[in-house]
Image (tube, rainbow, N blue to C red):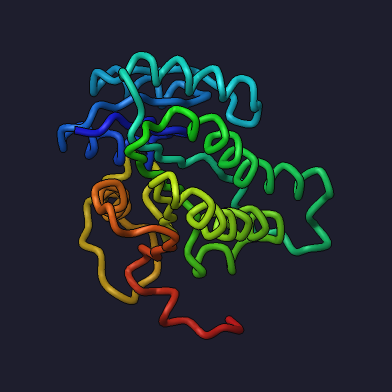
Amino acid sequence: MSRIIVSGVGSGMGCNASKLLKASGHDIAIISRGENGKKVASEIDAHYSSCDLMNCEDTSRAISELTKKLGGLDAVVHLAGGFFGTKKVEEVEPSYFGSSLSSNATTFYNVVQASVKHFSGSGGAIVVISAARSVYMNSHVGYAAGKGAIDYMVKLLAHELADRNIRVNAISPGFIIKENCGNADFSDRLGKNGRHDARYVSEAVKMFIENSLVTGQILEVDAGFSSQVSSGF
């Protein structure tokens, strides 16, 4: 059993991943800014902290409090992000670009910086949600910058933290169901666009946490759609 903090939990992927990890026997603590994360924590009997992940001090406080409640820390799953949209570059205001970048990359930085000191000598795992090419190529420059920053941070952190036995990986989902805890009432098909069931992302999260030999990887979970589209759209 691992002691896991799941940060940035909403009604879709975060809810789904938290429930799968809990059902798999792991001890879970949840961080969110809104009511969705609190509701999920209540449903699965998980520890909970309300936190603004954009604020480094508040993030550090929440991570420390939850680590104490868990009795230690073995893994972190980070899902905060957002700001997907279809704006053209001339429509993206500087403040919106900055918010898009920060909501994705800064929250990840804050969570990692606050967490690494809590891992024991045996190490652990950090898993972050990025975005498949089929998603960021249909968004805007700020969103792409935020997800791109995450991908490069994963590569650097995997190298930097390897000697502490801390593995760092990313999952890049396609479009995922946001409602109903990410559960879809249809069958997913390979190579097809559209929103997919969040359980496929949750299963990848679980794999990255439990596989002790994988680090520095960015795994697309989008039914292979990104591999089917041309680079120029």
Q: Position of residue 190 (x, y in %)?
A: 28, 74
Q: Position of residue 123 (x, y in %)?
A: 36, 40
State which quadrant residue 196 falls in: bottom left
Residue at (67% x, 60% y) in the render: 140
State which quadrant residue 60 falls in: top right
Exactly how many numbered labels are in the figure?
Answer: 0
Q: Along the line of sight, which residue is nearer the eye, 45 or 214?
A: 214
Q: Position of residue 20 (x, y in %)?
A: 22, 39
Rendered-image quadrant of the N terminus? top left
Left of 136 or right of it: where is 176?
left
State which quadrant residue 215 falls in: bottom left
Q: Along the line of sight, which residue is nearer the eye, 52 or 175?
A: 52
Left of 180 or right of it: where is 80?
right
Residue at (50% x, 59% y) in the render: 131
**Image height of 229 relative to 161, above or below:** below
**Image height of 227 relative to 211, above or below:** below
Residue at (52% x, 85% y) in the render: 230
**Image height of 159 relative to 118, above or below:** below
Rendered-image quadrant of the C terminus? bottom right
